Image (cartoon, rainbow, N blue to C red):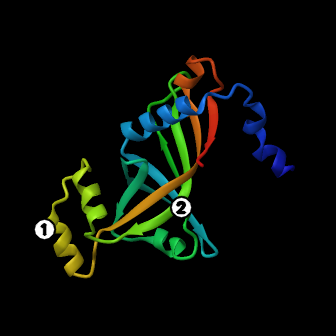
């Protein structure tokens, strides 16, 4: 088997590239429309793909987490992939984005942490978060900065561009 040819299958097919502004608009729309994703992490210890809730704010993906295997991988490899898609999508109604990026940990109860809490649809309150932190079991906040997006979106196709698009972030 030629793995390189298989890996490049879709990139060879994309000939009608959408303008970056349209791709960014579609990405923002998808990430703002949903709240669930799968976050994949890996290291020399293995791989993990965790379904989690996320918050899309100021161009970053934020994920609150109590802990789990993903942290074992993140200790040595900050690279992640997040996949967001409409679960009811069928051909002609597909809206998905894979976000490739790096993770940093937001300091618990910091100004940035609390700003994300304030902009979240989740009903977290400061007293609860302070109590968790004081108990030694804080609610961690992961911040994902994207460096590449892979989009599959029916609306882009309706605009006359290939359904699959890749956008490298500068």
Q: Residue 156 at what x, y percent from top left?
A: 56, 24
**Left or right: 116 as drawn, with respect to 42:** left
Coordinates of residue 155 in the picture (x, y in percent): 52, 23
> SS at mark 2?
strand
Q: Residue furthest right?
A: 1
Check contact, mark 1 vs mark 2: CB within 8 A. no
Image side of residue 91 versus residue 114, left or right? right
Residue 44's image quarter?
bottom right
Judge whether residue 87 can be spotted in this image: no
Residue drawn 47% across the image and 58% down it: 144
Considering every residue shown, the one lying at the far front of the view is: 170
Q: Position of residue 61 (x, y in %)?
A: 42, 52
Residue 111 figure quarter: bottom left
Badge 2: how crowded within 10 Å, few (<14), some, or many (20+)? some
Q: Residues within 10 Å of mark 1 (few under 14, many from 20)?
A: few
Q: Which mark is residue 102?
A: 2
Determine the residue positioned at 25% across, 69% down.
109
**Image-based side of 44 in relation to 101, left or right:** right
Q: Which mark is residue 127?
A: 1
Secondary structure beneath dot 1 equals: helix
Give the residue displayed 16% in from the left and 64% down from the top.
126
Residue at (20%, 80%) from the top-left corner?
Answer: 134
Q: Which mark is residue 40?
A: none
Earlier-in-chain disc, 1 versus 2? 2
**Residue 151, above or below 168:** above
28 vs 143: above or below: above
Q: Is residue 127 above or below residue 51?
A: below
Residue 102 visible from this viewpoint: yes
Residue 141 drawn at (x, y percent): 35, 65
Query: How far separated are the C-alphas under marks 1 and 2?
Result: 30 Å
């Amino acid at each position: 088997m030629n793995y390189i040819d298989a890996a490049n299958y879709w990139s060879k097919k994309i000939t009608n590239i959408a303008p970056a502004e349209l791709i960014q608009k579609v990405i923002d729309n998808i990430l703002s429309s949903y709240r669930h994703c799968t976050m994949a992490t890996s290291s020399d210890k293995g791989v993990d793909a965790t379904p989690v809730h996320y918050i899309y704010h100021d161009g970053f993906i934020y994920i609150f987490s109590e802990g789990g295997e993903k942290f074992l991988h993140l200790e040595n490899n900050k690279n992640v992939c997040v996949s967001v898609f409409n679960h009811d999508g069928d051909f002609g109604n597909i809206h998905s984005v894979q976000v490739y990026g790096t993770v940093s940990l937001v300091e618990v109860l910091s100004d940035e942490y609390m700003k994300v809490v304030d902009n979240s649809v989740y009903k977290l309150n400061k007293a609860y978060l302070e109590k968790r932190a004081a108990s030694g079991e804080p609610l961690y906040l992961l911040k994902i900065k994207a460096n590449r997006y892979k989009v599959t979106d029916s609306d882009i196709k309706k605009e006359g561009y290939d359904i699959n698009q890749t956008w490298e972030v500068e």
